[in-house]
Amino acid sequence: MINDSSMRIVRALRDWIAGAPAGARLPSTRSLVTSYEASPVTVQKALRTLTAQGLIESRPGVGTFVRAVRTARPSDFGWQTAALGTSHSRLTSAAATMRPTPGGGIALHGGYPDKELLPDRLVRAALLRAARSESALTRSPVSGNPDLQSWFASELAADTPLGVNSVLASDVIVLPGSQSGLSSIFRALVSVGQPLLIESPTYWGAILAAEQAGVRLIPVPSGPYGPEPEDVARAFEETGARAFYAQPNYANPTGAQWSQDTATQILDVVKTYGAFLIEDDWAHDFGITTNSTPVAAQDDGGHVVYVRSLTKSISPALRVAAIIARGPARERITADRAAASMYVSGVLQAASLDVVTQPGWQTHLRGLRQQLQSRRNLLVDSISQYASAAEVTTIPTGGLNLWIRLPDATHLPELITECESNNVFIAPGNGWFPAEPTGPHIRLNYSGPNPGAYPEAAQVIGRALNQGTNSVR
Amino acid sequence: MINDSSMRIVRALRDWIAGAPAGARLPSTRSLVTSYEASPVTVQKALRTLTAQGLIESRPGVGTFVRAVRTARPSDFGWQTAALGTSHSRLTSAAATMRPTPGGGIALHGGYPDKELLPDRLVRAALLRAARSESALTRSPVSGNPDLQSWFASELAADTPLGVNSVLASDVIVLPGSQSGLSSIFRALVSVGQPLLIESPTYWGAILAAEQAGVRLIPVPSGPYGPEPEDVARAFEETGARAFYAQPNYANPTGAQWSQDTATQILDVVKTYGAFLIEDDWAHDFGITTNSTPVAAQDDGGHVVYVRSLTKSISPALRVAAIIARGPARERITADRAAASMYVSGVLQAASLDVVTQPGWQTHLRGLRQQLQSRRNLLVDSISQYASAAEVTTIPTGGLNLWIRLPDATHLPELITECESNNVFIAPGNGWFPAEPTGPHIRLNYSGPNPGAYPEAAQVIGRALNQGTNSVR
């Protein structure tokens, strides 16, 4: 996004300002246009940048001046400490997976697929059509674009067995990304201080959203095939919880997929306790050797509140997701959504619907499946060849991640730092545990750029692990 | 968004289904393409619609069938009542201002400017450029596009007087619309159950967001020139509140604008009580006879948390806004934003930045000013000519609304219904009061479609008022 010619002017003017007295008047925009052979827009942009940097200030109708207070006294925000009190949650401002990667690094820590895995041409064509359509200048209805609601409903209806009432378009609430949906669901279905069952380990963003909503997390251990139905029943029994957050297909981070049996049994448990299953189908489009079959498709009693996102499969810039819920739960969630964000950009909704209804979308998904399979296989092979101390807990049948158990003696922060100093970026597993981690884990994402570097990355991880073990001994 | 040729097929197939036995197999997509002379995409769309309506179901690889359970047993969601408990807030799912207008009606109830007032060509051109840029396929940083952060900072810096440290680009947090920002600010700065001062009347969306955040609202009366500084001081003193939500420029609904004196005094009060002023500058671009000068520009102690939205001035489809805050408050808000939504669509950010940095943007704003002035004047004149019982409380110097006090005897719901039966849509004032309304009010928005109909609308309101008064007597 950096406009080079405006940066050139910024640099030149910064030198000029350094030598000018406070309050000196800058040359007029017109004369800067001439001196720097740049357009007025570029000059204005440079001036805005310098203003934002606190070096100059403009007085409308008078001119632009070198700021009088250049070595500004530092502001004292100490009073805010009294006003804000102690922090009531462990919200952190940037999780490991959202960190940008320095140029040239091998990024295994991220959560978003690389451009190479996105339907580039479909996205651009859809945005071009949306730019020309009515949707560019009108407000979307609060619950979403009706055709997009209909599409989300039909996707779930396609998996619904005979004899089960399928969901309707009016059960769908369109969201600006699934993260804001999780917050709303937790607030709407669980009161502040009340218990919420949650798989452990599980998606850190869900842990964050639950803490923001002020609910009390009750971890339920989840293995390579999901949690044991008896564990879920016991947790409901002991805590009186009325909701369980889970990712039955390609769970993040473990890659676990519930079997049909597990799904049926857990749905029965949920019904027995008069509770909700909050099903986060984040990786619906990322099946590799199986498909994602939502538990929600088996339920017509309003027990499953279903979340599906298109952000990662279409483009991180087209953030669109949906909640599907029935009965009073849907009303509660809709009311919370209205308070939280009113409505979703119609341009993003129109463009997303356009992408998923093109014939090219199915072709894209088939190609994606193959790419994910080769990437996953290459990463698994590389780890077992070069970092055999690292145990891949499950070969995932879908999703974007490997969840890896490291030897007990591993010092995780040292390992991460050691890998980073060799330009390999990995995510420490601790963030995925709602309570204490059960041991040192890392998560490796195989949807980032440059999969050809997986063997090299595995070598770095392997060497770092060996060093760590040696130093402990 | 309705595709006519797909609706044609939906209607025809619905007739066919009505006459078919449950479980009957529909003709293949290919033969439907031939029969209806439509594209495969159109046929697929019709089938999706029928699926979402619960009339058919597809079994992948087998075919599409008339649903066995067509007169489905109604689902019983009664168990949810026990799981959800009583509703802990008075969140309503759709506020009066968000209602769509039936065709042909005169819409004075809405909150979003008509297309005629939007920079149509700039928006479309910006979206086209964004569709072709990197931003279409990449994830934005958590706090926003750096150039857009810089622009928001420079806008505020332009109003900052000499000797006050202006804000930096890094103080800016980009949002997907200001509504979600209000929720985050209230959660981050005020704990659950703690007091928050708020102007009364004020923006209903802020009342909604505050209730969602679980804070306790303390109304401060606000007149045509804003609240009395002494009232604000007394409210801080009596309640121990540490934050005050206000709209110092062109307040919604009253149109009030604080004088320079009021702003300085209230900022002093806020500093005295070690508190935050949450300044919602929603109508920054909608000055008519004055400009919006943010209170935030006078503060460098981190006391003002500033919210500015571009949604209403650029396009309701490009939802972009920003919070500007300093010190630990910014950290708290950033952490809440990460939990609430992660990041904002880069396409919307790139397109918004593109619009506001075009030379045509300033031209657009000048034209908008004139249009708002004629619309406001016409509506004021129409009301005083045809509905003299309705008192325009202030001639607003900016913003989009007239706030009207009606005679004490007015029965508001009857008046609204009577006007609607004559195709005139107005918003009852009750929603803008955080406590009981101080009398019957309505809000009339003069940025909707068809301003030529204002005299006619005023006549309808005038007649309804006279009828109401007569029937009471």
Image (cartoon, coloured by chain):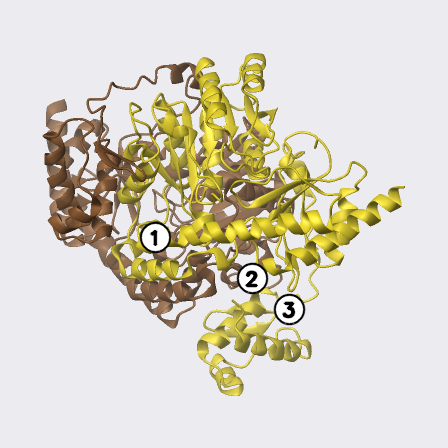
Chain colours: A brown, B yellow
The picture quadrant where one finds residue B392 is top right
Label 3 crowd (10 A; few <14 / some 14-19 / many >=20): some
The residue to which callout 2 is attached is A161
Quick check: can you spot residue A259? no
Image quadrant holding the C terminus of chain A, namely top left
Rendered position, B80 above or below A93? below
Neighbour tally class for label 2: few under 14, some 14-19, many 20 plus, Cα within 10 Å: some
N-terminal label among 2 and 1: 2
Q: Chain of mark 3?
A: B
Horizontal and vertical percent position of residue A199: 43, 37
Residue A168, image x and y in percent?
59, 59
Q: CA distance from mark 2 to mark 3?
A: 10 Å
Going by the numbered disc 2, the residue's amino acid type is: Pro
Labelled pair 3, 1 in contact (Cβ < 8 Å):
no
Location of residue A90 by image quarter = top left
Task: Give the structural element (helix, strand or loop) at label 2.
Answer: loop
Q: Which residue is mark 3?
A: B68
CA distance for labels 3 and 1: 41 Å
For marks 2 and 1, give the one nearer the viewer: 1
Q: Is residue A411 depicted above or below A248 in this figure?
A: above
Give the residue pinned by disc 1: A317
Distance of mark 2 from mark 1, alpha carbons? 34 Å
